[in-house]
Amino acid sequence: MGIGIANPDASAILDLTSSNKGFLVPRMSSVLRTSIPGPAKGLLVYDTDSSCTFFYTGSAWQNMCVSTGGGKIDSVYFGSNGTLTVVDGTGASKTTTLLGWLTNGNRGTTSATNFVGTTDAQDLVVKSNNTEVMRATTTGAVGINQPAPNAGAILDVTSTNKGVLIPRTKVALITTPSLGMMIFDTDSNCFCYYGAAGWRNLCGASNAWNLTGNSGTNSAVNYAGTTDAQDFVLRSNSNEVLRTTTAGAVGINQPAPNVNAILDIKSTTKGVIFPSLTSAQRDAIVAPAAGLTIYNNTLNVHQFWNGTCWVNVGQTVCSFNYTTNFVTPTHTSDCLFVSNFSSISDTIQVNLVNGTPSPVILSAVGVPAGVIVSFSNNYLLPPQQSIMTFTALPSAPAGTYTITVLATSGSTVQTLTYTLTVFGYNLSVTPNDTTISAGSLTNGGYISQAVVAIGNTSACQAGTATAILSATGMPGTINVSFASNIISMPGSTVMTITSNCPQPGTYLITVQALIGAVTTTASYTLTITPMLAVKITTNQTNLDLSTYFGNGHCAGNDTVIIEPGVSVCSSNPGQPALTTGTLPTGSTLTIINNGSIVGAGGDGGSDPANVGQSPCPAADGGNGGDAIFIASSTPTRIFNNGTIASGGGGGGAGQALTGTNLSVLCNFNFGNAFYGGSGGGGAGCAPGAGGTTANCNVGSAGTAATGGAGGAAPTSGGCGCNVNLIITSFSASAGAGGSGGNLGQPGNPGGGSNSPGNVNLSTSCPAGQGGAAGYSLNGNGCNCASVTGNAVVGPTRP
C-alpha cells in the first residue's frame, strides 16, 4: 500500500512518501501508555512525558530513544513481505513479522496454509458498510444476505427485491458443458440446462405442460399420461380425484376402478348431477345419440333418448294412451289436522286406453312445508291404483293449498288438482311460562294463572261444539286446575297452578284439549328457582325468622344473612334478640352473621325494703337476655363473622341493717333500718337498669358492653352510722349493691351489712344474688344448633 506515492515499493506492505510531512504515531503520557491493557507485541506510541517513541516487546515497553546498547534508534523499516525492522544507533536490528491480509493484496502466500476464515467453531462473516452480505457456516452452508442458511442447502440466497443472475452466454460458446450446468441463453432468451440428453430449453422447447397452457401441440403425439405400465393419476390438494388404469378403466374418487367398468365413481356423501335441461332445451338437442341421458327440470325426472323419442328412465316405449283420475271423483279435497303425524288419504286410478303400457310416475307439487306426501306405489303400470297420503307435522302451517298431482310417462304428463286444507284448533296458553322463587311458595298456595283459549278457524271444524281440557307433565307437588274444564269453541277459561311445595326445577306442563276423537296440545313452562337468602340490611329488634319462612311456607334450606354494620337487639331480657320461630317441618336454617346479635341486660336488684316484712322481698339481680333462641328442632348452622353475645346479669342488692339497740344508738331518721345499696344493671344491647333503694345509694345502669356499678353503702346517711359514746363506740352500715355483669357474664351478688356485735340482726333480709347471664345460643335442649367462626360471648345451650 502506498500513501503519497503512486508506485509503492514492492517490498513494502506500507510505503509512506512525503517531502514535507512525517509519520505521526499516537501521543500520550507515561501513565496512559503503561495503562494500555494487553498491549500487542510491536505496538508503537509517543510518550509525551519522555518525548520519546516506545514499542512493546511482548514483555515490556522499550524506549526507542535509548537502546539496550546505550544508543538511539537509527531507523524503522516496513518490509514488503509484512515485516517491521528496527535499527538502533549501533547498527543492531530486530525484525518482526506483521500477520494480516493487506487491503491491496498479499504476496508470498501458500494456499494450503494461508486463508481468510476461522480456525474455531465460528461462522465466517463478510460485511460491507458494516452490514452482513455473506456467511459461511461451520456446517458448510453459504448464505448470501441470509444470516441463517438452510442446513439442507449448500447455497441459500435471500432477497425481497433482487434476483440471482446466472451466466448469460450462448449454448454454442460452451465447449465442454458439465451435467447440471445452467445458463441464460442469449440466443433464445431462455434458461437452458445440460442433461444426459444434451442442452434443454426451459421456455417451452421441452415436453412439459405449462401452468398456463401450451400452444402448438399435436394431439397425435402430445398428451398427459404415462408411457409405461403405470396408472395415470390426477390429484387436488394432494388427494387423488381421478385415475385412469392401464386396463382402460377410469375412476373418480376411486383408486381401484372396477375392471368391468369404463367409469367407476365412488362417494358416500355425494351423487352425480346430469345436465339439467328444460323440455324445450332438451328438444333443441340436434341429433341426440341413443342412450343420451339428461335431467328434465320441467318434469323433475331423468330421461334418455332411445333412438326414437325421449323416455323416462324405466320406460321402454315412446308413448301410449292412459287416463288418470281419483277413484272417488267427487273427493278432490280434504282437511288435514295439525298434530304429530295425523294423516288423510285418497286413491288414484291410472287406466290403459290403448298401446303397450309403460310405467307412469306419480308425484305432487304445491305441498306446503310441514306436510309429507307419499304414494303407496309411485311407479304404476296401467291399469293400477295408488293410495296418496298426506301426513302433517306439528310445524305444518294452517291454510288452504292447491296441490297438483302429476302422472308422467315419457314426455306425457297428466295432472289432477287436489285442495288440501290444513287446520288446527289454535289451542293457546297465555302467558305460556312463569318463573317463581321457591321462597315465595306456601303449602297449597297460589303459584300462577294463565288463560287457556281455543279457536274455531275453518269449515273443517264446523259441528265441533266443545273441548275437554286436562293437563299432564307436572309432579304431584304441583296442582293444575281449570275454572271450567269443558269449554265451548271458540272459548277460553282460566288455568290456575297451586303448590304442594315442589322442588326447584323447570316443569313442562302440557295442556290437552280433547275435541271429539282428536287431541290438540299447548305447552306451559313453570320454572321454580332455588330460594334466595334473606338479607337483613337494617337494624332489628326482637327479630323472628318465622316471619320470612313460617306461616305456611314450604320447607326448604333457608338462609339468613345479617349484613355488616347491622345490629339485632332485644327490647328486654324476656325476649331473645333473634328467635327462629316455628319453621316448617323438614326445613334447615343457616344464619350468616356479619353484624351483631346481642341480648338485653338484666336489671339490678332492689334493696330489701320493709325489714320486718316476711318473707323478705326479692333483692336478686335480674337475668340477662338470650342472643339467639332456637324455638323448634330445626337443624341450624350459624357462621359467626361478627358478634354474638348474651346480656349480662343484674347485680344483687346489699343486705339491709336493723336492730333495737341500733335504732337507739344511731338515732335512725329513716325508721328502724339502714337499707342496702341496689344492684347495678347488666350489660346488653338494651342495658339493664340499676335497682331501687329506699334510703341508700342506687346502682348504675349497665352499658352496651359493661355492667353498671352497684350502689355503695357508707356508714352515713341512709346506709349506716358512726356511734361515739362513753359507754360504746362503733360504726354500722348496710350492704353495698353488687355490680352488673358484662356481656355474657352473671351479675355480682350484693354485699352483707357491717354491724357491731351488740346489734341484733336476726330480722334482717339477706343480700340479693347476682342475675344469671343470658345464653348466646339457646337451643332449648334440641341439640340441633352449632356455631362456627368467631367465638360467642356468654354461655351456650345447644
Image (cartoon, rainbow, N blue to C red):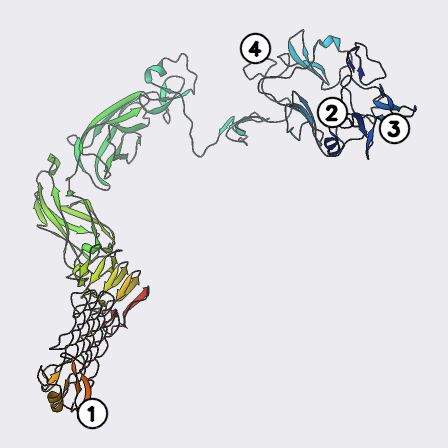
Q: Where's the C terminus, which quadrant?
A: bottom left
Please name which of the two marks, 1 or 4, marks the residue nearer to the observer: 1
Query: Which numbered disc, 4 or 2, marks the residue that appears first in the sequence?
Result: 2
Dot 4 alpha-carbon crowd within 10 angstroms: few under 14, some 14 to 19, many 20 or more: few
As shown in the figure, which amino acid type bears the numbered disc 3? Ser
Name the residue nearer the viewer: 744 or 562: 744
- 352 left or right, relative to 177: left
| Residue occupied by mark 1 | 757
| Residue occupied by mark 4 | 215
- Disc 1 vs disc 4: Cβ atoms closer than 8 Å? no
**Picture quadrant of residue 357:** top left
| Residue occupied by mark 3 | 67
- 399 left or right, relative to 263: left
Name the residue nearer the viewer: 523 or 705: 705
As shown in the figure, which amino acid type bears the numbered disc 1? Gly
Residue at 25 percent across and 70 percent down: it is 742
Query: Which numbered disc, 4 or 3, marks the residue that appears first in the sequence?
Result: 3
| Separation (CA) of disc 1 from disc 3 | 131 Å
Q: Secondary structure at mark 1?
A: loop
| Residue occupied by mark 2 | 27
